Image: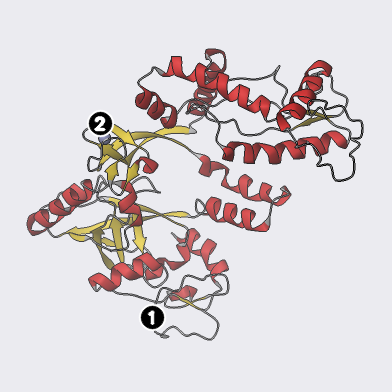
Amino acid sequence: MDISDTSDKPVNLNRGEEPPPYDPSLVEEKWQQLWRDRRTNIVDVHDAADPFYALMMFPYPSAEGLHVGNLFAFVGNDIYGRFQRLQGHNVFQPLGYDAFGIHSENYALKVGKHPSDLIPQNIANFRRQLERGGLMVDWTHSLATTDADYYKWTQWVFLQLLKHGLAYKKQAAVNWCPSCKTVLANEQVVGGACERCDTHVEQRFLSQWFFRISDYAGRLLSNLDTLDWSETTKTAQRNWIGRSEGAQIVFPVKRVDGDGDGDGESIRVFTTRPDTVFGATYLVLAPEHPLVKPLTGGIYTSAVEQYLARTAKQDVVTRKSSADKTGVFTGAYATNPATGKEIPVWISDYVLMEYGTGAIMAVPGHDERDFEFATVFGLPIVRVVAAPGEAADTPLTEAFTESSEGTMVNSSRFDGMPVREAKPAIVELL
Ligand SMILES: [Zn+2]
C-alpha cells in the first residue's frame, strides 16, 4: 500500500499483513500545510471575541539550533493553548527570540563570527525547527530582542526605572578573568577557573546595576495568594521575597583600638530578624566594605590586609559555597543599640557586599552561619529566643532558627513576649 497517502480513510489490511510504518514527516507536513492555508493559528489581536494570551518564554538563539529541552517546555504551553482553544477562546500564542547575553557572545566567540551575522542565521534555523514542531504559534506576530525596533522599548523601560529611582548602581563583587579581561557569570566559572581559558578566576569589586525590587515585596507577597501555582512553588517564592522584609539597624562605632580614623562612624545592617538584636554579639563587614580601612589600624593592619588579599583571589562561586568560616578582627568595637554593650567588628568573606548593606549583625544563637563563625573564633553565643519548653538558660548546641512559636528571653523588657509581637516593638524602639 501507499504510505504517502495520509488521507483519513481507514486502512484495510489483509489477514497477516503488517500495518504500514508510521511516517511522522508525511502526516505532520500535511496538517501543518492545512493550518497555514486555513490561517488556523492567526488571531485578530484587536477584535478577537474571546481572547486568550498564551505566552511562552522566548528561546535564546545562542546556538545553531534548538535543544530538546526547548521543545519540552514549549509543548506544555502548546497543550495548554490548545485546551483553551477547545474551550472556545481565540488563543494568541506568539513566539520570539531573546538573543542578548553571555551565551550568544560565547557562541559567537567560539565560531569566530560577529553576533550580528550569527544571530539572524540562528534565528532562521530556530524558526524552521519551531515550525516543524507543529506548535500553534501565530508567526505573523514575532520579534527578536536584538531588533532595534524592539530594544528601543527595552531602553525606554530602563529609563523609566532609572527616572523613578528603581534602577541604581552599587559596588558588587564579580568574577574576573585576568586573562580574558572580562567579568564572568557564576556559570562560567568552573572549579575556580575561567571556562574560556582555564585561568584562575579572581574577584573584583565593580560598579553594577541593580533593580530595587524590594520596594515591591509587599505586593509580590500578597499577589501570590491569587496565583494558581503549587504550594511548593509559592512557598519558595515567599521565602525569596520575604528576605527583603526586615529592618535597618544602626550600630555606632564605639572605639577603634588601632590607629584607624573610623571613630564616630556608624555601621548600618539590614536584618530580617530585628527581634534577635539583643543576641547580636559581634558585627561582620564584607571585606570590601568601605569602613574596613577606616576601622583598621596599628597591630591589626597586616592581618586585615592579608585577609583582603586572600579574599580578592577567590571567585564568587567558591566564596558563596565555601563551608569554612574564616575572618579577622578589625580592632574596632561598635555599640549594640539594644544592650548598650560594646561588640567587636570583624570582617569575613561569608558577608557579601552586594547583599543588604554589606554588613551584618551576627546573632550566633539564632543563625547557623553566625553560630559556626562564633564557634570557630570563640565569640559569645547568647540565646534570645526560647522554643516552648525552653528557658533563657537552656544551652544552645546549634543555632535555634525557628521563630514562629518562640518567646523572647535575655532581651530586657521584651522578655516573655512572643517573637511575632517583639519584631515590630523592637523596630519601633530602635
Ligand atoms: Zn579567561
Secondary structure at numbered mark 1: loop
- The reply, left or right, for residue 350 in relation to residue 34 is left
Q: Which residue is drawn at 55% across and 24% down?
A: 157
Quadrant where the image shows the N terminus? top right
Would you say the beta carbon of the disc 2 residue lies within 8 angstroms of ligand 1? Answer: yes
Is 430 rendered above or below residue 97? below
- The reply, left or right, for residue 35 in relation to residue 291 is right
Q: Alpha-carbon neighbours of circle 1 within 10 Å: few (<14), some, or many (≥20)?
A: few
Residue tagged 2 = 180
- The reply, left or right, for residue 336 in relation to residue 238 is left
The image shows residue 60 at horizontal and vertical percentages of 52, 30
The image shows residue 162 at horizontal and vertical percentages of 48, 27
Inter-mark Cα distance, 2 to 1: 47 Å
Residue tagged 1 = 397
Location of residue 376 (image quadrant):
bottom left
68 or 229: which is nearer to us? Answer: 68
Q: Which residue is drawn at 44% across and 27% down?
A: 104
Secondary structure at numbered mark 2: loop
Q: Which residue is drawn at 84% across and 33% down?
A: 85
Quadrant where the image shows the C terminus? bottom left
